[in-house]
């Protein structure tokens, strides 16, 4: 429990933004969080706002997760629309920590339910290079508001995220800067808390597999922070992500990944306009994380 509270729900400034980095999407979880270049338009507020323009259409997205034996529950809902030139999205994200035990010198003092809420407004735009081109550049941004309710009080915050996606088939590269302008939280006790920028870089490569009636997608990513946090690649203050996906006839997918040293796996199925994805990972100290998401196109 101490490890979990230290790194995921800490009240301290260094880890103040950890609740924003829990993987949203069963597909993203299964692929080890290597998702900066792969997010669907309705998932883009959580991964890279520039991805909201990579597809055409309208989508509604729902997500639920129970992590670390039910200690953390988080949910998300979003809607997005795009004509492949511009895209708009609205998303709501909630993280809940039910029955957290507050202690003093290992003596239990109180229990409380604590919650974090984030509302995203997303906009993306395609940058044209000419009438005919095989390369596409997309730009996007989130404007977000945050509400945190803890035993110590409550806080409101405001922040901006920025993203870039560049497609040159079969490659895609992307950059997502979370808390681009540094997000500031105002606590009702009169204190302030800063959430500093986090750089998320990604690359993916699509490999047609006609012999297997489908395709493979290989993806990698690197999260780099400017704080003195503990990371998997501590020499460069970064956490790595690797994922592989096989898609059969755009209907069924199996996935495997490596998320900051933890193995992950999952699958997805598409039935008409409905897509359902499941992902799971295992941490040797904190246990199993399961994530289920679904999206509907209309």
Image (spheres, helix red, strand yellow):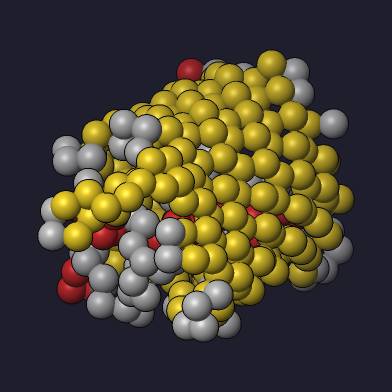
Q: Is residue 263 visible?
A: yes
Q: Is residue 23 above or below residue 172?
A: above
Q: Is residue 167 visible?
A: no
Instruction: Name the residue nearer the viewer: 218 or 150.
Output: 150
Instruction: Name the residue nearer the viewer: 84 or 297.
Output: 297
- Name the residue at the front extreme: 109
Q: Is residue 193 above or below residue 203?
A: below
Residue 24 in the image: state x and y as whole percent.
52, 44
Taking 133 as reference, is 12 left or right?
left
Taking 269 as reference, is 59 left or right?
right
Residue 100 in the image: state x and y as whole percent.
35, 46
- Name the residue at the left extreme: 105
Q: Quadrant of the C terminus?
A: top right
Q: Is residue 222 above or below residue 217?
A: below
The total of numbered circles placed on residues is 0
Which residue is painted at 37% across and 75% down in the image?
13
Which residue is painted at 82% across and 41% down in the image?
57
Which residue is painted at 42% across and 41% down in the image?
98
Q: Quadrant of residue 256?
A: top left
Residue 73 in the image: state x and y as whole percent.
46, 38
Taking 142 as reference, is 269 left or right?
left
Residue 156 in the image: state x and y as whole percent.
60, 70
Taking 72 as reference, is 147 left or right?
right
Q: Is residue 209 above or below residue 48?
A: above
Which residue is painted at 22% across and 66% down in the image?
230
């Amino acid at each position: 429990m101490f490890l979990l509270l230290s790194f995921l729900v800490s009240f301290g400034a260094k880890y103040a933004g950890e609740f924003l980095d829990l993987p949203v999407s069963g597909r993203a979880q299964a692929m080890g969080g290597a998702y900066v270049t792969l997010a669907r338009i309705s998932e883009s507020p959580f991964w890279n706002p520039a991805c909201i323009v990579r597809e055409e259409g309208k989508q509604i997205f729902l997500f639920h997760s129970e992590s670390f034996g039910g200690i953390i529950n988080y949910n998300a809902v979003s809607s997005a629309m795009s004509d492949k030139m511009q895209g708009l999205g609205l998303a709501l994200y909630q993280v809940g920590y039910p029955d957290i035990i507050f202690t003093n010198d290992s003596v239990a003092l109180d229990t409380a339910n604590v919650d974090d809420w984030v509302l995203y407004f997303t906009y993306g735009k395609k940058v044209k290079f000419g009438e005919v081109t095989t390369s596409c550049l997309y730009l996007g941004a989130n404007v977000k508001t945050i509400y945190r309710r803890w035993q110590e009080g409550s806080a409101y915050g405001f922040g901006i995220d920025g993203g870039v996606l560049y497609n040159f088939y079969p490659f895609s590269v992307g950059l997502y800067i979370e808390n681009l302008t540094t997000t500031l939280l105002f606590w009702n006790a009169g204190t302030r808390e800063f959430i500093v920028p986090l750089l998320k870089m990604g690359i993916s490569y699509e490999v047609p597999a006609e012999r297997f009636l489908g395709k493979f997608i290989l993806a990698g990513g690197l999260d780099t922070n400017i704080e003195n946090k503990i990371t998997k690649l501590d020499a460069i203050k970064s956490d790595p992500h690797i994922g592989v996906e096989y898609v059969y006839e755009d209907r069924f997918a199996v996935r495997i990944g490596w998320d900051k040293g933890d193995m992950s796996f999952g699958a997805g199925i598409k039935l008409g306009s409905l897509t359902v994805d499941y992902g799971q990972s295992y941490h040797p100290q904190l246990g199993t994380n399961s994530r289920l998401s679904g999206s509907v196109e209309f």
